[in-house]
Image (spheres, rainbow, N blue to C red):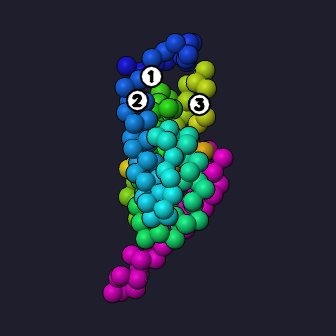
Amino acid sequence: MIRRTPRRNLATDAMSPAAAEIRFAIRSVLSSWSALVAEERHLAGPVRDIAELARFLNRHLDWLAGHPAAGELVDEVRTLVGTARRIAYPDTGRRVRIGHCPHSDCDGDLTALIRHRGDRHPPRIVCTTTPGHSWPVTWWNTLARQMRTKEREHETGIRAGRSDGR
Ligand SMILES: [Zn+2]
């Protein structure tokens, strides 16, 4: 069901199953990466608490950036962030399609999430296929520029592929 009014009593509201699930997923992912750091660096790992795990990983960020699995870590965290954001800021507003996602390997479309009046969550620009492609609306100018560049590259590619050169 779509909630039309903001929650009145956050403190006594039970956590939604989706929120509990993403919380569990975040803790699992952070704790497995913390375990990797602890093992490979011969350190004592942190307790299984999201804030502690995040602090621990943050302290070893430079080391992690040079790890062969760094890309995997980035992908996993990006997916978690996207999912958590969708759960925390449910889509209760209107979607307006604004063009193709500027990410080079993404076929998604960008839509602006226009919130209902009274919705405390800020409006965002989100991609229809990749949860991590999500920006605050203040990024609009930058995104529009990237979208134009991608379109130009695409058109140039099509023209270059033609044998008659037109
Ligand atoms: Zn995208």
Mark 3 surroundings within 10 Å by alpha-carbon count, few (fewer than 14), some (14 through 19), many (20 or more): some
- Residue drawn at the location 33% of the way across and 87% of the way down: 163
Q: Amino acid at mark 3?
A: His
Q: Amino acid at mark 1?
A: Met
Q: Is residue 21 above or below residue 76?
A: above
- Residue drawn at the location 59% of the way across and 30% of the way down: 121
Residue in front for this viewpoint, 83 or 32? 32
Q: Do labels 3 and 2 touch, CB within 8 Å?
A: no
Q: Secondary structure at mark 3?
A: loop
Ligand 1 lies under 8 Å from the Cβ of mark 1: no
Q: Amino acid at mark 2?
A: Ala
Q: Secondary structure at mark 1?
A: loop
- Residue drawn at the location 56% of the way across and 16% of the way down: 11
The image quadrant where one finds the C terminus is: bottom left
Q: Position of residue 71 (x, y in %)?
A: 44, 64
Mark before the other along the chain sequence, 3 or 2: 2
Magenta stretch containing residue 163, yes or no?
Answer: yes
Q: Is residue 33 above or below residue 126?
A: below
- Numbered circle sitting on residue 20: 2
Judging by the rendered image, the residue that carries numbered circle 3 is 121
Q: Secondary structure at mark 2?
A: helix
Secondary structure of the magenta portion, mostly? helix
Mark before the other along the chain sequence, 3 or 1: 1
Residue segment shown in magenta: 137-166
Judging by the rendered image, the residue that carries numbered circle 1 is 15
